[in-house]
Amino acid sequence: MFIGIDIGTSEVKVLLLAPDHRVLGSAGTALTVQRPHPGHSEQNPHDWWAATQSALAQLRAAHPQEFAAVQAIGLSGQMHGAVLLDAQDQVLRPAILWNDTRCALECTEMMAELPDLTDLAGSLAMPGFTAPKLRWVAKHEPAIFKQVAKVLLPKDYVRLKLTGDYVSDMSDASGTLWLDVQKRTWSDALLALTGLTQAHMPRLVEGSAPSGTLKADVAQALGLPKGIVVAGGAGDNAASAMGMGAVDSGQGFLSLGTSGVLFVVTPSYQPNAASATHAFCHAVPGRWHQMSVMLSAASSLQWVTDLLGAPNAGVVAEKAGALSAAQRAASPLFLPYLGGERTPHNDANVRGSFHGLSFDTDAARLGYAVIEGVTFGLKDGLAALNAAGSSVQRLSLVGGGARSSFWAQQLASALNVDIVTHGSSAVGGALGAARLGWLATGAASADVCLSPEVEATYRPIAAEQTLLLERYATFRSLYQST
């Protein structure tokens, strides 16, 4: 038996995986986010540990015998968060999260001071990353900064509570802006930008390697065998890839949730930072991955759903899908930048807009425009990945948007790839984390990283591609004119 622990932003989720690949059960405990000032987003690291204990207790109660037979634990977590510890491992301040935007100025300063930053880190300096957060703390909270002995990522704080060890993995460390991503080691040059050294950093291991063992007192409290291995684990997207079996070059997934993420495995380090893509280490040795990120994906559909007073987003998608080709061609165009955009524009100030509204525009056409606009934003992201050398023929579609067969088909035609969905199959960070725990026991990856059962496959349709390409050309010109 293997446990996966996923430290999310809204929930800590745990999962129990059997050696025959069955997910025996899962449990979760909700989290809250504090926003003390505009642009700030924080959580108390103690809440992650309390939520982890609560979720594991639920899992133990539901599956006592299997829980007691667990052989390993894997960890997944929200990336980029900054947990600051003093020399006694006391938390110095609330953790600054991935969606905190306070350090935009610090990003600009870092890029100016180290021109080859993107070559080392594989990404532009962005407010979401960990390093500029520490530069902000040094500038605005110098008394706290002076006490910093260790900086940990969210899942690695939970690891500290489990094992007593300061460890991170390559995939999660890639999102700090302190890692030399090609060499898979901390970079002294990047650390110097924030006044830190390698002594402040955790030890690095591969995500599929052991990082430590469960402390005896913690094992007793949790009801787990003492001394079981805790794997290096992964950042949430790399862990999700492990859950979907995306471990070899050219495999990937598309997450259509609040934001939109395209993730493609690469055999080498292939950055394209100029287009705001991320080149990160994967959770297994000898693999990297590229990501493009758009900030408003399924959240755009929810926004227009609320605006129209529709019962739910599924109803809007269904009405949009019922439009004829002629009606789609006459629908407005939508720029999906409601909260700025990352890939490929890296523009925090750009905003969304409708173009081509008329008296014929109704709720179905507005819904269609929004779905199509998000699809075009993802097409921009895939083009940025292709420009950096990525090649992909099939993508797993996950997230809330995966429930719309119409949207899945449109994505297949627009991106010119096969799109597969997995229905209710357990995919996500907790499953990937459990698999990494399994690998840390010495299991072979071919035996562990299976793709979930495919529910449906969507292939490009030539007639739909023709219409979408025409509208995409206009979409691109509209962005250029904003």
Image (cartoon, rainbow, N blue to C red):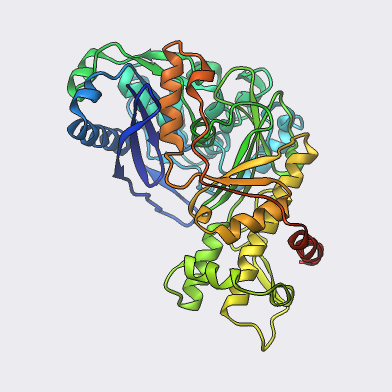
- In the picture, measured across the screen, residue 475 lies left or right of residue 20, that is right
Q: Nearer the viewer, residue 450 or 472?
A: 450
What is the x, y in percent for residue 198?
54, 17
Q: Where, quadrant-wise, is the N terminus in this rendering?
A: top left
What is the x, y in percent for residue 353?
66, 71
Residue 159 versus residue 477 in the image, above or below: above
Q: Residue at x 49, y 65 (%)?
A: 302
Q: Residue at x 64, y 83 (%)?
A: 361
What is the x, y in percent for residue 367?
58, 71
- In the picture, measured across the screen, residue 435 lies left or right of residue 191, that is left
Q: Residue at x 65, y 60 (%)?
A: 349
Q: Residue at x 44, y 27 (%)?
A: 152
- In the picture, measured across the screen, residue 348 lies left or right of residue 201, that is right
Q: Visible in this render: residue 385? A: yes
What is the x, y in percent for residue 439?
46, 17
Residue 131 versus residue 406 in the image, above or below: above
Q: Outermost residue, bottom direction?
A: 359
Q: Quadrant of residue 359?
A: bottom right
> Looking at the image, how many numbered discs can be counted on the residues?
0
Residue 403 versus residue 366 in the image, above or below: above
Q: Quadrant of residue 300?
A: bottom right
Q: Nearer the viewer, residue 50 or 270?
A: 270
Q: Where, quadrant-wise, is the C terminus in this rendering?
A: bottom right
Q: Nearer the viewer, residue 438 or 13?
A: 438
Q: Visible in this render: residue 344? A: no
